[in-house]
């Protein structure tokens, strides 16, 4: 999935076995240098690891095991097809059970990239992102690179809130933190957007922008629909242009 980022960290968190995590969601300025909005979110303390679950049912980003979302897109100027499957597997990271999500990216009929993403949900309903194992493949299926791979608890990497339980306009946060490698950030723009994709046309969509200091000047917009999850991602500033739109829901 395409995901790029913002200008400054707005989510403060620490998660380790046996500890609690203090989460501060604030408003922040975009990479374009626009002025900050007023803070529009709450400060919460997430539960101890034992209160996390691999059962992710946040309505904006549900991960029912066995369901696959299919996307068509453009990446590096090439048409792509992507399959995002919430598997029945779980894996513990920093002692927390995470849902394993399989992400397969094809160019034509060639598998170009495979990723295992790790998500967990706290008792408040916030969806946390604990890392990914990713591999870029050549046309023969040989591994070219594992760039982008990271896990919370290794080499200073920390989990982030991928999506809050109760998003409100202006709320912003850091979705992942592996210094110099994974620093995606988001800000909620509205919860009333209309978005059309090949799968359907939706109203009342959650609209966010995402950026990372690792790719200055690049901003993406993302749209979530309750009961489904992500239905569209698109680059709105900077290059290269990338886009992903939902075409099917299976399972």
Image: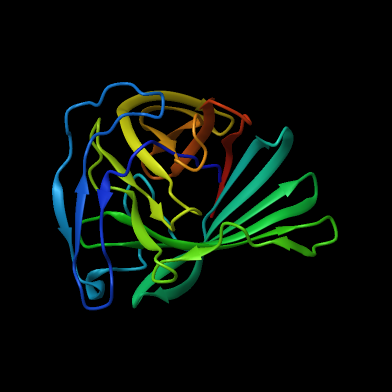
Residue in the picture at 17% in, 28% down: 38
Residue in the picture at 25% in, 37% down: 171
Percent position (x, y) of residue 153? 39, 71
Q: What is the number of callouts on the image?
A: 0
Q: Is residue 56 visible?
A: no
Residue in the picture at 18% in, 68% down: 20
Residue 111 sits in which quadrant?
bottom right
The vertical placement of 217 against 65, above or below, is above
The vertical placement of 33 against 50, above or below, is above
**Extreme-front residue of the structure:** 180
Q: Is residue 7 visible?
A: yes
Residue 50 sits in which quadrant?
bottom left
Percent position (x, y) of residue 141? 80, 62
Name the residue nearer the viewer: 154 or 242.
154
Percent position (x, y) of residue 250? 56, 51
Side of 131 where 206 appears, left or right:
left
The vertical placement of 12 against 6, above or below, is below
Percent position (x, y) of residue 62? 39, 52
């Amino acid at each position: 999935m395409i995901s790029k980022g913002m200008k400054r960290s707005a989510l403060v968190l620490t998660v380790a076995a046996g500890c609690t995590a203090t989460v501060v969601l604030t408003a922040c300025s975009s990479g374009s240098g626009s002025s900050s909005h007023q803070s529009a979110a709450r400060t919460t303390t997430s539960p101890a690891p034992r209160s996390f679950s691999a059962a992710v049912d946040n309505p904006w980003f549900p991960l029912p095991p066995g369901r696959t979302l299919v996307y068509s897109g453009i990446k590096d100027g090439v048409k792509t097809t992507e399959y995002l499957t919430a598997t029945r597997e779980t894996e513990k990271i920093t002692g927390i059970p995470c849902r394993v999500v399989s992400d397969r990216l094809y160019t034509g009929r060639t598998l170009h990239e495979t990723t295992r993403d790790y998500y967990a949900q706290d008792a408040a309903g916030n969806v946390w992102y604990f890392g990914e194992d990713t591999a870029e493949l050549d046309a023969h299926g040989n591994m070219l690179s594992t760039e982008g791979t990271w896990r919370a608890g290794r080499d200073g990497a920390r989990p982030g809130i991928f999506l809050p339980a109760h998003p409100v306009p202006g709320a912003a946060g850091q979705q992942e933190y592996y210094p110099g490698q994974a620093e995606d950030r988001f800000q909620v723009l509205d919860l009333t957007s209309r978005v059309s994709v090949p799968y359907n046309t939706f109203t009342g969509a959650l609209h966010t922008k995402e950026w990372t200091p690792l790719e200055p000047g690049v901003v993406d917009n993302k749209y979530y629909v309750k009961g489904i999850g992500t239905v569209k991602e698109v680059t709105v500033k900077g290059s290269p242009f990338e886009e992903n739109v939902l075409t099917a829901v299976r399972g």
